[in-house]
Image (spheres, rainbow, N blue to C red):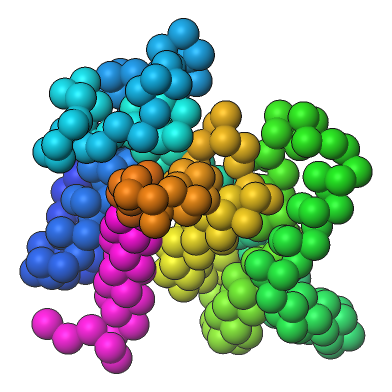
Amino acid sequence: MRNVNDLWQQVQQSDLYYYYRRDKVAIASSLVFITLALMALFSPLIAPFDPYDLTQIDLMDSEMPPAWLPEADSRFLLGTDDQGRDLWSTILYGMRVSLLIGVFAVLLQSAIGIVVGLVSGYIGGRVDSILMRIADVQLSFSTLMVAIIVLAIVKNAFGGATYSRYAMLILILVIGLSEWPQIARTVRSSVLGEKEKEYVDAAHVMGFGPMRIMFKHILPNCLSPIFVIGTVQIANAIITEAALSFLGLGMPVTEPSLGSLISIGKEYLYSGSWWITLIPGFFLIVIVIAINLMGDFLRDVFNPRLYKD
């Protein structure tokens, strides 16, 4: 308990907490994101229906309008989709899928980007040139274009049933492996500035090896830009997953994400069942905006030239 109190006192004395308390936009965006994330995490407890349970789905309930419109059913607060699933429950489960893909894809690209950026910036020379040229080649291709090509090949090679079973894992791998160069270049630029400082020279004098110097001494001083770009990358990963699902290359309709829900509803948008697309789209926009606003706040706080009290 004492350690928790000491940690909380350190948080209260930090510059991040000081500026956070004074930034209404950061407070509002973080509260919105935390609320939606908790709702998604505990969706099995909150959702009135289980969209994965076929015994709770009735095709006769398909395309029911939201509860505030005529001919609505009070059981379905936000209406139903084309399969008769409760849209509110499906959105909660879909948010969980989208957030899991976004977070784990960023963790993967961060792991690759940190290692490549540390090695490239610290060792330099030919190693730096080779790694950065690889990163440049990767950056020259659109993430969405690479993902579409890879996912189309995988889907045709293994079949729709196998792809559907491992869709989340495949999306995490594709999105994560497509975006690592941005984090790698960010880490490299920070390492180039840090490795010339006195504490690194002192570590050399004490006989520490390159691995210990890179990961134990330099990396902790490069975390600020990683947190900033990582936050923004989560939003980008969620948008990428939504775009791929909209194109039919993401999550299957049996395990909906926000993107696949929008894709399902596009065929009914002009037939009057607008809620199937617009309501999940609204939740997607809110999540992405909240994450981007938190990223902007972190960028300003960690850059004293931009943030002013």
Q: Position of residue 25 (x, y in %)?
A: 16, 68
Q: Is residue 248 left or right of residue 124?
A: left
Q: Position of residue 14 (x, y in %)?
A: 22, 62
Q: Is 149 rendered above or below residue 58?
A: below
Image quarter of residue 38: top left
Q: Position of residue 258 (x, y in %)?
A: 45, 46
Q: Is residue 141 left or right of residue 238?
A: right
Q: Is residue 183 visible?
A: yes
Q: Is residue 238 left or right of residue 304?
A: right
Q: How many marks can you see?
A: 0
Q: Is residue 41 visible?
A: no
Instruction: Identify the residue at image location x=50%, y=45%.
Output: 264
- Camera-side residue: 231 or 46? 46
Q: Which range is magenta?
A: 280-309
Q: Is 122 rendered above or below residue 248?
A: below
- Camera-side residue: 183 or 191? 183
